[in-house]
Amino acid sequence: MANERIVVIGTSAGGLDALRALVAALPEDFPAPICIVMHTAPESPGVLHEILQRAGHLQAVSVGRTERLMDGRLYVAAPDAHLVVEPGRARSTKGPKENRFRPAIDPLFRSAAQVYGPAAVGVILTGNLDDGTAGLATIKQLGGITVVQDPDDAMYPAMPLSALKHVAVDYRVPLAGLAALLVRLMAEPLQGAGEFTVPHKVNVEVNIAKEQHPSDAGLEQIGKPSPYACPECHGVLLQLEDEGRIRFRCHTGHAYSVESLVADVDEGIDAALWNAIRALDEATLLIQRMAAFVPNGGNTAAELERRAESVRRQSDAVRKVALDRESLYPKG
């Protein structure tokens, strides 16, 4: 292995400011590579590595296809691509979205655990929902060190809170103390390196992130069919269990926690309601236009106007549901 240790960091909402503060406090001789995933839109300009390089002393790179891992360097996930770790290198892939994102945090964390085991340090910073919790649990399972930004210190505490709820986290620290903690952890003797067994389930999910066909990777061996459909591709979701925590994957490979699945379903309901409103409003306009071509005073024109009014009432009723309904998942 080219590097004795690795640090992997995941963040979402509020992550830019958090990463800039962390990177600014890290020394230029930091003795390990640092891989970073921050949720970004596919159309993002992909300049996070430039921002982080200006923020501190470490050289930063946006990972294209592959990059050799070097101590004291930042490796940033590119827009619309997962970042995974392999022996001696970081790799960008177009694997299926996880928790509604690509890049997602879980693929990076799982791959770091798979390759480095006890030598991996996983860090969860500010963010919404719970991406990174499953991956952090894998790092913990394989003997690595788990770190979470103190939720009271996070701009968006949901991701740190989820990690603390589901993982026996080793360190809970405010952002201002994180750089010093990482430096101290890198200086401590490494225990148990090379003495870990990677569970089959971890290998399956890492290989899916690396673009292997989910069936060939062995997805059916680690999950059972659920009654739910994938919001992304509408295929059947397989249910996976991690020590009592339920997750889902479809045959295409899209992955969801319960929280991210509910959030995606909620967005689908909202879209469906507004699509129904659009269709009803268009029908109202169409029927009114038809009535305009009927001779004045004709019974048919009156009937069409009655129908148009009926459809308008239906649209108003659906619009009221759309405007008044409570979200399935609390925002923020």
Image (cartoon, rainbow, N blue to C red):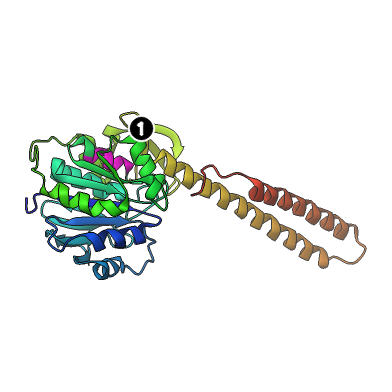
Q: Quadrant of residue 217?
A: top left
Q: Nearer the viewer, residue 222 or 124?
A: 124
Looking at the rendering, the stretch of residues picked out in magenta corresponds to 133-139
Q: Quadrant of residue 240?
A: top left
Q: Nearer the viewer, residue 114 or 71?
A: 71
Answer left or right for 30 relative to 22.
left
Image coords of residue 209 (percent x, y)? 26, 49
Q: Residue at x 37, y 33 (%)?
A: 246
The answer to whether residue 256 is visible is: no
Image coords of residue 101 (percent x, y)? 37, 53
Image coords of residue 19 (percent x, y)? 30, 59
Q: Amino acid at mark 1?
A: Arg
Answer left or right for 55 relative to 162.
left
Name the element at disc 1.
Answer: strand
Mark 1 burial class by Cα count in 10 Å: few <14, some 14-19, many 20+: few
Q: Residue at x 36, y 35 (%)?
A: 165
Image coords of residue 225 (percent x, y)? 38, 32
Q: Residue at x 77, y 51 (%)?
A: 313
Eyeballing the image, is 89 above or below 116?
below
Q: Residue at x 83, y 58 (%)?
A: 305
Magenta stretch: includes residue 331: no
Task: State the predominant SS element of the stretch in magenta.
Answer: helix
Q: Nearer the viewer, residue 294 or 175?
A: 175
Q: Nearer the viewer, residue 229 or 117?
A: 117
Residue at which label 1 appears: 245
The answer to whether residue 71 is visible is: yes
